[in-house]
Image (cartoon, grey):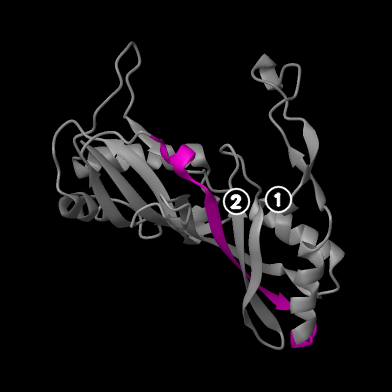
């Protein structure tokens, strides 16, 4: 059977790389006694897959993974045993039992990323100016940033892999919405919804930094805090819904 789970990643563990996160979960599964299913072959490994790896330094309330089990286990027991084993900053929030492996992997289902961006201002700013700045940003014909690609040529360090080549990307098609959630005289919170195209997306910090660059909003950059709030998929009516309902 397969279990799809939603979990948090907060506190100091936001600086954990994706590879280290995978290792953390593999150890937690073993300590919790979760009956994992393994791949076949010379080097078997647990059958677990993650949705849209999170950038290092970004907090999250909505990360997801699928894990295949070798025998049935209730979602209540799964959540309890895992949360007793995992660190407090990484906790399972929900779990859904799937009768069989889903047709689409999590990375294929992800269609929209929802982020909260909070920050302080270096000086008080008129309320309407923030909204005007966002409108100006979103109404440009294009907004180009430098982004690492995967189409570099040649060998990387120690001869392994390919170098990542910088390329120019227009970020505006990726932005579903960029709006004010809350604003005070010296601080604000924005909600940023970013689309996923063919399993490719744009990091929220790239979009936020570009907006700061072209706006006249006096953001105190050392106060910026980004948190992923949800990962959404498209339902049968082409509406965005969370991965687990």
Residue displayed at 34% across by 11% down: 42
Magenta span: 104-127
Secondary structure beneath dot 2 equals strand
Residue displayed at 23% across by 33% down: 36
| Mark drawn on residue 73 | none
Q: Is residue 26 left or right of residue 62?
A: left
> In the image, residue 27 lies at what x, y percent?
32, 39
Secondary structure beneath dot 1 equals helix
Locate the C terminus and report the quarter of the image it occupies.
bottom left
Mark 2 touching mark 1, by CB under 8 A? Answer: yes
User: Disc 2 designates what residue?
Assistant: 195
> In the image, residue 145 lies at what x, y percent?
80, 48
Of labels 2 and 1, earlier in sequence is 1
Check the image and name the residue furthest to the top.
42
Check the image and name the residue furthest to the front.
237
| Residue count near mark 2 (Cα–Cα under 10 Å), binned few <14, some 14–19, many ≥20 | many
| Residue count near mark 1 (Cα–Cα under 10 Å), binned few <14, some 14–19, many ≥20 | some
Residue displayed at 72% across by 61% down: 208
Residue 119 on the magenta span? yes
The quarter holding residue 137 reads bottom right
Residue 160 shows in the view: yes
> In the image, residue 128 lies at what x, y percent?
76, 85
User: Disc 1 designates what residue?
Assistant: 173
């Amino acid at each position: 059977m397969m279990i799809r789970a939603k979990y948090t990643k907060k506190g100091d563990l936001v600086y954990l790389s994706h590879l280290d996160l995978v290792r953390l979960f593999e150890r937690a599964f073993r300590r919790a006694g979760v009956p994992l299913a393994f791949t076949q072959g010379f080097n078997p490994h647990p059958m677990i897959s993650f949705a849209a790896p999170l950038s290092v330094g970004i907090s999250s309330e909505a990360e997801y993974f699928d894990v295949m089990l070798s025998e049935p286990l209730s979602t209540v027991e799964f959540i309890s045993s895992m949360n007793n084993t995992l660190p407090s900053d990484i906790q399972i929030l929900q779990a859904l039992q799937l009768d069989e492996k889903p047709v689409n992997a999590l990375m294929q289902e992800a269609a929209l990323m929802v982020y909260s961006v909070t920050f302080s201002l270096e000086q008080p700013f008129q309320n309407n100016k923030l909204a005007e700045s966002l409108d100006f940003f979103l109404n440009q014909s294009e907004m180009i940033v430098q982004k690492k690609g995967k189409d570099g040529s040649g060998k990387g360090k120690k001869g392994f892999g390919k170098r990542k080549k910088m390329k120019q990307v227009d970020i505006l098609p990726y932005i579903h919405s960029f709006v004010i959630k809350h604003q005070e005289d010296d601080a604000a919170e924005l909600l940023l919804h970013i689309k996923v195209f063919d399993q490719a997306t744009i990091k929220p910090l790239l979009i936020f930094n570009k907006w700061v660059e072209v706006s006249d909003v006096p953001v105190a950059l050392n106060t910026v805090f980004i948190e992923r709030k949800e990962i959404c998929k498209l339902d049968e009516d082409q509406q965005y819904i969370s991965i687990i309902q």
